[in-house]
Image (spheres, rainbow, N blue to C red):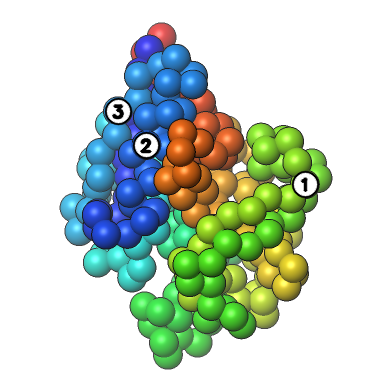
Amino acid sequence: MSCAIGLIGEFDPTIPAHQGIPPSLERASKKLGKVVRYEWVPTTEITTVKRLCAYDGIWCTPVTPYQNMEGALLAINWARERHIPFLGTCGGFQHAIVEFARHVLGWEDADHAESNPGATRAVIAPLSCALVETTESVSLFPDTMIFREYGVSEILEGYRCRYGLNPDFRQALLKGPMRASADDKTGEVRAIELDNHPFFAATLFQPERQALKGDEVSPLVTAFVRACIGRGAGAAS
């Protein structure tokens, strides 16, 4: 049994997170004993959902700004509404929040301050302290999927990020079905999950960087791949 994963974003071999994604998927595949195929999908190619139909999972990768923000949002919307396993990291986290704000809460003017510095409702705004090539402690909330997968309450993760959830909108955005699942010592949200979805998680940190350390693979990436394999098996039956 195999599955196919679409990696949303413009591939750049100089980006450490992009370097970590292929070995992350390959190690998760080996660990689970299944074949995992993946393809980078530039956001400029996503103009309709036809470009996404072949995938059992969607990973919105760390690239900001995307060349076509609407393409990235369309991919996230497709995964969210069709219950397709979704993982968003760094920029994927940011855009998952924008997509939810626009299409679930109905905030049509919700935007990303990097793409639109003059946005009236910037749900993604500059971090109080930029996290560029840093490793920080992340606290995982009890009774969340990410906590169950890691099996610990605190992890160390790498970042390359200057934007995150605007705290002015935290309460309205994360009261359900989207919820915070991790924060850090500042109390700022570092991961979110979606209720009533087979797998929908996004992190501001970059778990794919674990694959750049020897033969490691993030438990979150493994969980995502497992969900994609499950969807692939269901589609084939």
When the figure is inspected, residue 222 is found, relative to residue 157, above or below; the finding is: above
**Residue 32 left/right relative to 78:** right
Residue 135 pos. (x, y %): 58, 62
2 or 3: tag closer to the N-terminus? 2
Residue 235 pos. (x, y %): 39, 18
**Residue 212 left/right relative to 138:** left
In the displayed image of the protein, which residue is found farthest to the right? 142
Single out the mark in the foreground, 3 or 1.
1
Which corner quadrant of the image does residue 22 belong to?
top left
Measure the alpha-carbon separation of dots 1 and 2. 25 Å
When the figure is inspected, residue 23 is found, relative to residue 12, above or below; the finding is: above
- SS at badge 3: strand
> Which residue lies under the disc numbered 3?
37
Measure the alpha-carbon separation of dots 3 and 1. 32 Å
Dot 1 crowding, Cα within 10 Å, few <14, some 14–19, many 20+: some
Q: Which circle marks residue 153 in the picture?
A: 1
Dot 2 crowding, Cα within 10 Å, few <14, some 14–19, many 20+: some
- SS at badge 1: loop
Q: Residue at x 74, y 50 (%)?
A: 154
Comparing 215 with 55, the one in front is 215
3 or 1: tag closer to the N-terminus? 3
Comparing 153 with 70, the one in front is 153
Q: Amino acid at mark 3?
A: Arg
Say whether residue 89 is visible: yes
Q: Residue at x 20, y 58 (%)?
A: 44
Dot 3 crowding, Cα within 10 Å, few <14, some 14–19, many 20+: some
Q: Amino acid at mark 2?
A: Pro
1 or 2: tag closer to the N-terminus? 2
Which corner quadrant of the image does residue 144 belong to?
top right
